[in-house]
Image (cartoon, helix red, strand yellow):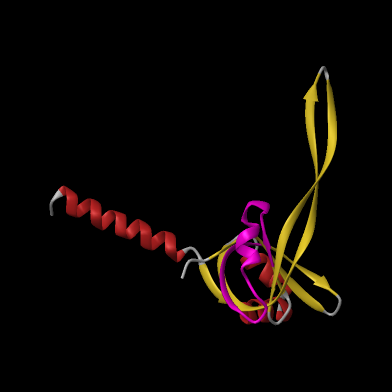
Amino acid sequence: MRLGARSTVALAVLLWAGCATTQHLTATELARRASEAPIAAQSELAGKDVVVQGVVRGTTLAQRESIVGQQGLGQIVAERRSETLSLVVLEPGAVLCYFEPEDIAQAADLKEGQTASLDCKIDSFRRSDNQVEAVLVGCRRKAP
C-alpha cells in the first residue's frame, strides 16, 4: 500500500471514529430517557455531544448571569454580567436547547412546527413542575 493510500485509510478511520462519538437521538427519545430514569440519563449522557432531532414547540430568549473576576491595582473586582441566549424548546416540551449569543440568527430562523436537527452538548437534566427536562447547551443547527 502506498503512503498516500495509507494516509487516506487512516484519515477515514479517524473521521469514522469521530462521528461515532456523537450520539443521534430524537427529542422524544431524550425526554423519555430523562423521564424514566433521570439519574441514569445524567450519568450516561451529561457532558456528551448529541445530535437531537425534533419538532420545534417554541422559541424565546433567556438570560444567563455570570460573575467575572478581574484583577487590577492589587485587588480583585467581581462584576456581574448578563447575556441573552436563544432558547428553542423541542416537542414534547422537555428538551431545552440553548444557543450562544453569536448563534442567535440560527435559532431565529427556526419556526414553531418545523423539524430541526441540532448539534448540542447535554448539560444536565432537571426537574421542573411535573417533568424532567433535558438541558442542552452550545446548540447549533445541523447542516442538512
The quarter in which the N terminus is drawn is bottom left
Q: Could you say where residue 12 lies in the image, as x and y percent from the top left?
A: 30, 59
Q: Does 138 appear above or below 67?
A: below
Residue shown at 76%/62% (left/top)? 61
Along the line of sight, the residue nearer the viewer: 7 or 85: 85
- Look at the image and say whether residue 103 sits in the magenta stretch: yes
* Number of numbered markers: 0
Task: From the top left corner, tell me how far across and down residue 123 is, in percent.
Answer: 68, 60
Query: Looking at this view, is 54 or 128 the one in front?
Result: 54
Residue at 24 percent across and 55 percent down: it is 8
- Within the magenta stretch, is there residue 14? no
- Position of residue 80 measured from the top left corner of the image (x, y, whole percent): 84, 41
Tell me if I can see residue 138 in this picture. Answer: no
- The residue at the point 36 percent across, 56 percent down is 14
Relative depth, front residue between 56 and 9:
56
Q: Nearer the viewer, residue 15 or 99?
A: 99
Q: Work out whether residue 90 can be spotted.
A: yes
**Location of residue 106 (image quadrant):** bottom right
In the orientation shown, which residue stands out farthest toward the left? Answer: 1
**Which residue sits at x=63%, y=71%?**
110
Q: In screen coordinates, is 55 left or right of 71?
A: left
- Judge left or right: residue 9 versus residue 32: left
Q: Quadrant of residue 113?
A: bottom right
* Quarter where residue 50 is shown: bottom right
Vertical relation: 119 (above or below) 37:
above
Span colored in magenta:
97-122
The image position of residue 56, as x and y in percent, is: 66, 77
